[in-house]
């Protein structure tokens, strides 16, 4: 009698899908906006990336930038814009490749 392989460790977690909302975020600088991530169908190890050099140069902060969501769980990612620039930043969420456009006014 052999035990089935463990599938609940975070390193093996796969199969869940990541829902990202909204698809566009409009922030008045300085200010913050929020993106809601939702896992469905299983555990999701997620991360967010921005074009290299964009976030620090344009005073855009993203927190948190990665994590693990259990099926049905949500997390709020906060995007903070501190500078006087009006950057257009595209955040890409993994898995799934969803892109959120951040428009700063």
Image (cartoon, helix red, strand yellow):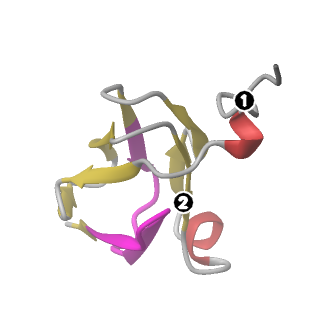
Query: Which residue does the numbered mark 2 point to in the structure image?
Result: 59
In front here: 9 or 1? 1
Residue 98 versus residue 18 in the image, above or below: below
Residue 9: x percent and y percent?
Answer: 73, 30
Residue at image position (43%, 38%) is: 42
Residue 12: x percent and y percent?
Answer: 71, 44
The disc placed on residue 94 is none
Residue 66 versus residue 17 in the image, above or below: above
Dot 2 falls on a residue whose secondary structure is loop
Horizontal relation, residue 96 to residue 1: left or right: left
Asked if the magenta segment contains residue 81, the reply would be: yes
**Quarter of the rendering containing residue 91:** bottom left
The disc placed on residue 4 is 1
In front here: 38 or 51? 38
Q: Nearer the viewer, mark 2 or mark 1?
A: 1
Span of residues in magenta = 77-102
In front here: 86 or 2? 2
Asked if the magenta segment contains residue 83, the reply would be: yes
Q: Are marks 2 and 1 in contact (CB under 8 Å)?
A: no
Residue at image position (57%, 80%) is: 51
Dot 1 falls on a residue whose secondary structure is loop
Residue 89 versus residue 20 in the image, above or below: below
Precedes in sequence: disc 2 or disc 1: 1
Overall secondary structure of the magenta stretch?
Answer: strand
Residue at image position (34%, 69%) is: 98
């Amino acid at each position: 009698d052999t035990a089935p392989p463990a599938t609940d460790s975070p390193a093996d977690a796969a199969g869940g899908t990541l829902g990202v909302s909204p698809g566009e975020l409009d922030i008045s600088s300085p200010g913050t906006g929020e993106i809601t991530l939702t896992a469905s169908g299983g555990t999701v190890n997620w991360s967010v990336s921005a074009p290299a050099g964009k976030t620090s140069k344009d005073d855009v902060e993203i927190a948190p930038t990665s994590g693990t969501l259990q099926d049905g769980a949500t997390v709020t990612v906060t995007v903070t814009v501190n500078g006087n620039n009006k950057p257009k930043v595209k955040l890409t969420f993994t898995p799934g490749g969803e892109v959120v456009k951040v428009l700063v006014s």
